[in-house]
Image (cartoon, coloured by chain):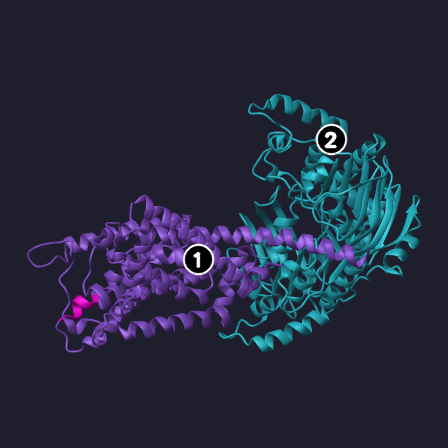
Chain colours: A cyan, B purple
Amino acid sequence: MVIEFQDIHKHYGASVANRGISFRVEPGRIHGILGENGAGKSTLMKILSGYTVKTSGRILFDGRPVEYGTPAAALDLGIGMLYQEPLDFLPLTVLENFMLGQASGFLQSRAYYERKLEEWCRQLGFQLNPGLPVGKLTLGERQQLELLRFLTLGVDVLILDEPTTGISPVQKEVLFEALKRLASQGKTLLIVSHKLEDVEALCDRVTVLCDGAVAGNLDAPFDTEQVLGMMFGTPPAPPPRCTASLGSTVLSFEEVSATGGRAGLTRGSASFRRGEVVGLAGLEGSGQGPFLRLAAGLEEPLGGLIRLGERVMNGLDPLEFRRSGVTFLPTARLEEGLVPGLTLSEHFALAFHDRTFVIPWNEVTSWTEKRIDRFRIRGRADSPVESLSGGNQQRILLSLVPEAPIVLLLEQPTRGLDLESARWFWQQLQGLCANGTTILFSSAELDEILRVSHRVLVFYNGSIVLNVKTDETDFNQLGRAIAGKV
Amino acid sequence: MREKSETLKGIAVELCMSLGVVLAFTTAVLLLAKAPPLQGYRYLLEGSLGSWTKIAQVLTVWVPLTLCACGLQYTFRIGLWNIGVEGQVFMGAMGATAALRWGVGSEFPLLWLVLSALAGALSGGVWALLAGLLKSKGGVNEIFGGLGLNFVAQSISLWLIFGPWKRPGIASMSGTEPFPPELWLPSLEGWRVSPHALLFTVAVILGTGRLLQSTRIGLALKAVGGNVRAAPLFGLHAGRWMLLAMVLGGGLAGLAGTFQVTGVYHRLIPSISSQYGYLALLVVMLANYRLLWIPFIAFFFAALNVGSIQLPMMLQVDSSLSGVIQGALVLATLLVHGWREKAAERRDAETARRAGGERHA
């Protein structure tokens, strides 16, 4: 199906997300939509998938103008969208999720759908256990399931929103193979991304959006400089590594075991020095999550010792960790890090005005405004946090970090951020590191880890399989370790 | 977009629609009961607001209802459903009675009245704390815990009335031996309501507002209620704040029970709470969890309760008609509110589309 956007506008109140977007998407090809955070790509895709209604403009399918306003109506027209967070039912099994929406009638033959699921999996090279609850799957597997569900519903056009965010390199490869196969079968694929490497590896054509408008269309092979130029004006330089000299040991794990996540942690030992930046690499769910939560005191170890300086921290509650200078920024910002419903001011009052009983709201507001300025947050003191974009929520989290934390733990800190935002984020972190803060962060991007950290820990199936200085390793060694080959 | 339904006009429209639904429903019920509806409404009105004595009666109901509803503000703010208010009122009444029994014949009745209030608040608070601990330590949902404790509290009160605290000679449903008048909360000449209780309740409303609006307690309750998982990152001990909210809510419910003993019945009776605990839940829901509305809605509910008392005599209609109206009102309000929200969303989408169309035509 040929999709044509003609002069699409979308206003949210006074703010404009799309201002006159026009371009054409051909069938049988993988079309990338590139742009930094807030460029308007998600909005445009939400319009196409019926999730929101455009303010003006026309959408044409095969030359015919179409009007619809719900995801169900879009699905009837053959359009399905995979969101970053799959819209599935966690307590149900893979098979039950698969059957939802397509099985009709009172008696549903599970065997029939199990065969059907198996067949699709084989066709696309996916491996899904039909009996497993979806809550136990990795993000990548949930994405595969969602993809299959849409295909069985007979969609012609598939929209994928940042499909490689939060999935492992292996899953990414499987996904890319599947997408290429689907394109060759004549499906129209739209990939929303701000990751150049993904787009370069996958797309036949890209449309670059900048500030709500089309900055240009390019065909493969892409010229990286040109694409970056369209996205940002000038290409950003990668963030430099922090060069502070390392001090004494501030945090150590001795043979620590714990449950949590998919793999838990098995007899993990490592120590971290003052001013050190350490990247935690590994497939999602290999033990990095529990490791960070153990270090933050949010989970309790089953065995082993966790020390902050000389002090054994086992069994102490998270508030004691926090008082001792440990700060944790989770990746699920709205679920774990911020409080939906509270304004920015209220967050700052919570974090920084814990000594006074009556809150000095005037003081808090002016303090909040200063922080908004300093951390370049796009929002007002009285905006509820959930009304801000993901990138801005991440900035709020960073702005809530106490003045000079001893240990800063970050879970996938740049997930979902565009290059410019990620670069800015790391500049801030390196300012902290220069003042002696030890930074531990997990990331799915090996590039990022190699660029900014002094040392890398590689997790595989709950164990730390590699602990190496960044200067003494390379992409290949890390890649092998991530896959369990040391 | 959400603010739209919060404007004065929006609220007025919703109120009128809800009242219309309730009026239609209640009229239907009255017709089914073969009672003349207009007469019924007249008796309701006259029976509650017809004279100063009636209004004073309404206020005696208003005090415990408002106290319970204010207490529920704390627990709702942190996301807990404190169904156990009813039992906390019972415990408060028992705590107050226990204190007053000590004070019979004392030379300082005022001291004992103050002590009874403290004992009442403490008993209600401890009873709520129990529900909170059941949740935090035992993993028992506070709704089930509270409901269970309600029955326990009621049973204890019956046991006390028919056992250790029974009237000399004979145990009776009419309750324990009345206290001597010097242990009654003083009321004005000809009024049955105590000005102290009224003033105290007003102070509680103002204090609750201030506490929730501008102190760390209010902010912490809101934060934990908004996202339990983020609480430790802000240095908040979620479990402890939940217990504090329960204790505050239970304490106020306990004071409501105290007032029932010292200000209204002057003894412990089996139905000392008059179900004000459950009614307060309806008040808070109808107020959409907003403190500002609570005193007014509580007054309206109290008026319905008092007004319906004479219905059986005048019209041979059961006095539970007030319950029918109260329940229907809450349901109708929730319904109208939800319906209008949906309509507003649709309208917003439509105007946005049209405005955009004109701009780019």
Q: Please state which of residues A178 and B266 is positioned toward the viewer in this rendering.
A: B266
The quadrant where residue A213 appears? bottom right
**Chain letter, disc 2 residue:** A
Image height of B98 relative to A189, above or below: below
The residue range painted magenta reads B99-104
Percent across and percent down for residue A232 are: 86, 59
Q: Please state which of residues A339 and B285 is positioned toward the viewer in this rendering.
A: B285
Image quadrant holding the C terminus of chain B, namely bottom right
Which amino acid, by three-letter code, is at mark 1?
Leu
Q: What element carries label 2?
A: loop
Q: Identify the residue position indicated by label 1 in the image.
A: B286
Seen as rendered, the residue at the extreme left is: B169
Choose mark 1 or mark 2, whichever is in front: 1
Image height of A430 relative to A87, above or below: below
Give the CA separation, mark 1 to mark 2.
46 Å
**Chain letter, disc 1 residue:** B
Q: Which residue is drawn at 67% across and 64% down?
A: A396
- Residue B65 in view of the camera: yes
Percent across and percent down for residue B244 are: 42, 63
In this picture, residue A38 sits left or right of residue A234 = left
Q: Residue at x 59, y 22 (%)?
A: A109
Percent across and percent down for residue A274 are: 69, 64
Which amino acid, by three-letter code, is at mark 2?
Gly
Asked if labels 2 and 1 touch by Cβ distance under 8 angstroms, the answer is no
Residue B114 is marked as: none
Q: What element carries label 1?
A: helix
Image quadrant holding the N terminus of chain B, namely bottom right
Badge 2: few (under 14), some or many (20 or more) residues near its Cα, within 10 Å? some
Q: Identify the residue position indicated by label 2 in the image.
A: A154
Q: Residue at x 49, y 61 (%)?
A: B237
